[in-house]
Image (cartoon, rainbow, N blue to C red):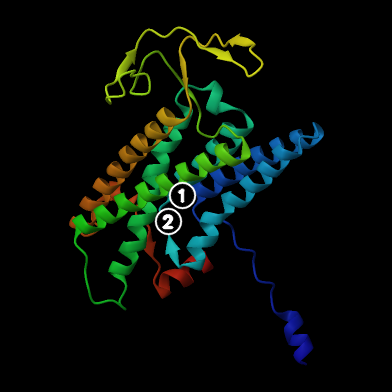
Amino acid sequence: MKKNEQAKKPAKPKEKPYAKPATLTVYLVLRALVIFSMVRAALRLDYESVFLCGLTLVLLVLPSAFTRRLNVELPGTLEIIILLFIFAAEILGELNSFYIRVPNWDTMLHTMNGFLCAAIGFALVDLLNRSERFSFQLSPVYLAIVAFCFSMTVGVLWEFFEYSGDRFLGLDMQKDTIISSISTVELDETRSNKTVKLEDIDDVIVVYADGSQQALGLGGYLDVGLNDTMKDLLVNFVGAVVFSTIGYFYVKEKGKGRFAARFIPKVLRRAEQDGEREG
């Protein structure tokens, strides 16, 4: 009898990766594009790109997995932004070389990264702020500051990662910048810490150990990563400030702002969790 009863039980329906129709549509379209890119790379025997596509497929599912694990609901707008960010960074940026072909592509993504990391930092503290287990209530200003600091910390750690890749693996994650003027104390013959300015630099000549020379024809001086790093941190700062401002007014208005609610995660109560699973 028990075996028959178990056999009669309906199979548990497979949960969709994303519950909201708009987010699910974006996810399915992006996944199809990634799979197409993976097949194309496999036919070219480009196994590095195949690995990158596989990693992207995993990253596209992670936001849904983490939110269900933590019993948190992401607004549809924020979910779509995260999915588009992953696709833009990995498939368009790395696989299709948008970082080189499209001007300011890296700048746009770092700005978005600052915004998203501020959202994560804000959510981590706001979830505690709303939890019934804790008796304290944090002010809107404090939440905004924490979100901003969290975003900037993640941005700095990412620049550490890029520098390590360039320094120890010979990569070029910190993209070099061509500049036409420099100010340095290294060229001061008096060694009195006075800056010497070189302006209107048109080219750089490399002299090798064997005495041979090569003109690079760059149209300026090749800066090794410093300008790119500072620019990335600056636009990360902009994204963090934008979200921190949104989060501040959201908390100050006690969650009544419709615009801010599109970007603020919330804790799912027991009834909401059951309803989401049934849906």
Q: Is residue 84 visible?
A: no
Q: Which mark is residue 79?
A: 1
Point 56% across, 36% down: residue: 166
- x and y percent of residue 90 in the render? 58, 39
- Residue 219's place in the image compared with 100, above or below, is above
Which one is earlier in the sequence, the residue at label 2 or at label 1?
2
Crowd tier of the residue under label 1, counting other residues whose Cα lies within 10 Å: few below 14, some 14–19, many 20 or above: many
Res 209 visible? yes
State if disc 1 and disc 2 touch (CB < 8 Å). yes
Give the residue drawn at x 46%, y 70%.
273
Identify the disc placed on residue 74.
2
Q: Amino acid at mark 1?
A: Glu
> On the image, which quarter does residue 199 sit in?
top left
Q: How many marks?
A: 2
* Element assignment for label 2: loop
- Quarter residue 124 falls in: bottom left
Q: Position of residue 58 (x, y in %)?
A: 62, 52
User: Compared to 139, does 10 lie above or below?
Assistant: below
Q: Position of residue 117 (x, y in %)?
A: 40, 49
The circle on residue 27 is: none
Looking at the rendering, in which quadrant would you find the N terminus?
Answer: bottom right
Task: Judge the density around disc 2: few (<14), some (14-19), many (≥20) Cα neighbours within 10 Å.
Answer: many
Left or right? Give the position of 114 relative to 44.
Answer: left
Find residue 61 and report its horizontal and vertical position in percent: 58, 54
Looking at the rendered structure, the kind of residue marked 2 is Leu
What residue appears at the point 40 percent right and 53 percent down from the top-left corner?
75
Q: What is the CA distance from the residue labelled 2 to the residue labelled 1?
A: 6 Å
Q: Is residue 32 left or right of residue 148?
A: right
Q: Is residue 132 left or right of residue 31?
A: left
- Determine whether the residue tagged by mark 1 lies in a helix, strand or loop: helix
Compared to residue 220, the image places residue 269 above or below, namely below
